[in-house]
Image: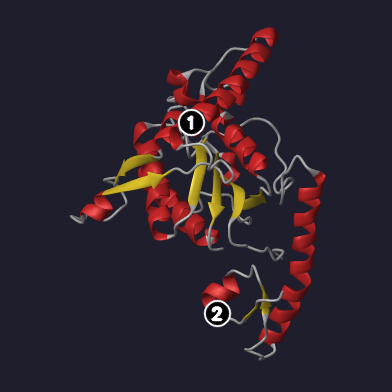
Amino acid sequence: MVQAFPYDEFTSYLITRNTSERRYFLRPSKELRDAILYCIADAQAQHPVQIHAFCAISNHLHIVLTDPDGTAPLFVQTMNQNIACFVNCTLGRFGAMWEGGARPNYCVLPESGDILDKVVYTLTNPVKAGLVSEHHLWPGGVSCVAQIGKGRITTKRPNKFFSKTDDPALLTRDLILTPVPGSEVMGQEDYGRYLAQRVADVEAAIAADRETKGMRWLGRKECLKINPFDAPQTKWIPFSRNPKVSSKHDEARNAWLLRLKRFIVPYDNAKKEFRAGNRDAPFPLGTFAMRVYWAVCIDPQS
């Protein structure tokens, strides 16, 4: 049974989704990269969220965002559904493209510094994996710091899977990239330069460590040759890690864990009442599915 989870307004997350059996269904190619960008932009146009960074790295997807109205799952559902359908269409396969039996992992980022740390983590993911020496060399879907500095990526509707249309609003979508909350004192370009330095520092540290160990990079050309049906040889235990919150400060992390604990009990009680026939049972703030799909009452004092 999936534990209840509160989706509060203006909460920031690192959202992660793994592919089925860790296969490289998201392996880099120009066609798939452009499609992933469009799928993210299209989902954002339908369900507005503030996107700070993202990276699709062969067998999983990271995206860092802030949810202004507590409906991030609608954005994630639309994005993941279209990416999965496009991948299956191009590979000529059927069935689940994403990991079965698990929902996307929403890891709450309580503070501005936590969000920025995960932005850097997300962008340097291909570097840490030893695929390329710099994040912008990754030929898959990634929000490079140069694009973040500009604040948007213009994407084009793919020729495959998506229905044909002459609607100019659908032929192209702008993927809006927003600085992390708390960085408003910096302009978009200044924020981009600061982020570029943070990313460059991490890339340099990873490169120095790999050089010391005599490890080589896979390289951009070899990345483009990845077989989408291959998977890592390392042993993997499904569902072994599912962090709900990440923060450098114990106080912030513990405060959110307490928030989760205080949400679960009233939510479960309200759901029991609702199932018993009480359609006026008040649900706590942060309720998502019952609020969106069943229009239940929300207790503003919860």
Whether residue 92 appears in this view of the structure is: no
Secondary structure found at label 1: helix
Q: Quick one: label 1, few (<14), some, or many (20+) residues within 10 Å? A: few
- Foreground label between 2 and 1: 1
Q: What amino acid is labelled 2 in the image? A: Trp
What residue does disc 2 label?
A: 294
Where in the figure is residue 251, as x and y percent of width and height? 81, 48
Q: Which residue corresponds to the image point at 74% horizontal and 68% vertical from the top-left?
A: 263
Q: Residue furthest left?
A: 166
Q: What amino acid is labelled 1 in the image? A: Asp
Q: Which residue corresponds to the image point at 32% horizontal and 42% vertical from the top-left?
A: 155
Q: Which residue corresponds to the image point at 26% horizontal and 56% vertical from the top-left?
A: 163
33 in relation to 199, above or below: below
- On the picture, is 264 further left or further right than 139? right
Where in the figure is residue 281, as x and y percent of width and height? 67, 86
What residue does disc 1 label?
A: 190
Which mark, residue 170?
A: none
**Mark 2 or 1, nearer chain start:** 1
